[in-house]
Image: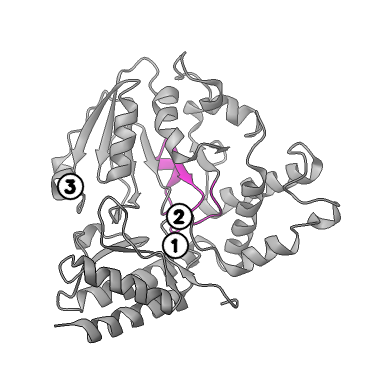
Amino acid sequence: MAEGRVYNFSAGPSMMPLEVLESVQKEMVNYKSSGMSVMEMSHRSKEFMGIAADAEKDLRELLGVPADYKVIFNQGGATLQFSAIPLNMLGTKTKADYLITGQWGEKAHKEASKYCTPQAACNSKASKFTTIPGKGDWKLDPEAAYVHYCDNETVNGVEFSYTPEVGDVPLVADMSSNFMSRSINVSKHAYIYAGLQKNVGPAGVAIGIIRPDFADGSKELKINPTYCSWKIAADNGSMYNTPACFTLYVMGEYLKYTKKIGGVSHWEEMSAKKSSLIYKAIDGSDGFYNCPVEKSARSRMNIPFTIMGGNEEVEKKFLDGAKKVKLYTLAGHRSVGGCRASIYNGMPMEGVEALHDYMKSFMDENRK
């Protein structure tokens, strides 16, 4: 680790690979002898058009995106897509199904109510979002315009270990917090969207991967704002207006690095190793640490845990002590409290090992 840096377990924006940061730093002032920074160049310049084209090409290659699917890069984060989804997918239908397994799925469902009748095909709120209901408990409507699910819930630490089977109804996935951490069966989805700021770069862009029948505008509502139109975004190469140029550039560097180290399979292997090490510390603590999430639904990306049954004084001591050994941003989300370790692609194994060792030493010193 570079001198002065810490292990940042933030839920996003999050830690990035040092090699990616250094690559950006090296070309910050003068990108490839162009005489200017990427932050300064026109988005329609030859140099930036090349950056954007390479980034999309690498993304498609890494995820195996079918050639007929469109890839777009939106501003407004994944949150704006909560509105864009019904606006681009409802067509003449008035209902949509939502699998609600955490706070982000809940927010997507609430936003859709402005445009249609969103139906909770399942909702695990009664369990405080600590599980994923079995398919036998889902109430899917074959007449729904689409089925939406959040593949990994950042706040609650819940992750699907499979792609939901929903019959012929178009499937939509929010993959913001586990995108690029494992392979995806893109063709099973009508739309996949994800914010960059967890596993693929800095904040400022949401990636959209669109099945062709939802990229042609045929199912757009008339009230759909121009900037939310997937057709307009796709037809204009995500440059209907000025895109988040520097964010796209850094994403491109992250994707190049991903290819260099072995692709998505490398991240998938590492995320399994890293998450299992922290869960091992929790499960082997005889109740000193506790993860509230059902084991079958545990996230590889976001690991929430409490200490001594949610003892706030001890948890504060844990967080303060962690900073002394360069372990930062381990507080749980403000809505749930406790602690949370977010271990995205950019978090090196050494950081996870350091957290594991600190958890063990803290337990030994504070167990009553």
Residue type of the residue flagged with mark 2: Gly
Most foreground residue, 341 or 183: 341
Most foreground residue, 59 or 15: 15
Q: Which residue is at 37% across, 75% downward?
A: 322
* Res 120 quadrant in image: top left
Would residue 32 appear left or right of 268 to someone viewing this image? right
Residue 213, image x, y percentages: 48, 27
Going from the N terminus, do you reach mark 2 or mark 1 first? 2
Residue 336 sits above or below residue 116 on the image: below
Query: Secondary structure under badge 3?
Result: loop
Mainly helix, strand or loop, the magenta region?
loop
Residue type of the residue flagged with mark 1: Tyr
Q: Residues within 10 Å of mark 3 (few under 14, many from 20)?
A: some
Residue type of the residue flagged with mark 3: Pro
Which residue is identified by label 3?
133
Going from the N terminus, do you reach mark 1 or mark 3 first? 3
Which residue is identified by label 2?
12
Residue 235 sits above or below residue 172 on the image: above
Residue 31 sits above or below residue 267 on the image: above
Q: Which residues are magenta?
A: 178-203
Residue 37, image x, y percentages: 77, 51
Which residue is identified by label 1?
344
- Whole-number angstrom distance, CA of label 3 to CA of label 2: 27 Å
Q: Nearer the viewer, mark 1 or mark 3?
A: 1
Of the 4 image quadrants, the one containing the N terminus is: bottom right
Of the 4 image quadrants, the one containing the C terminus is: bottom left
Is residue 189 located in the magenta-colored stretch of the structure? yes
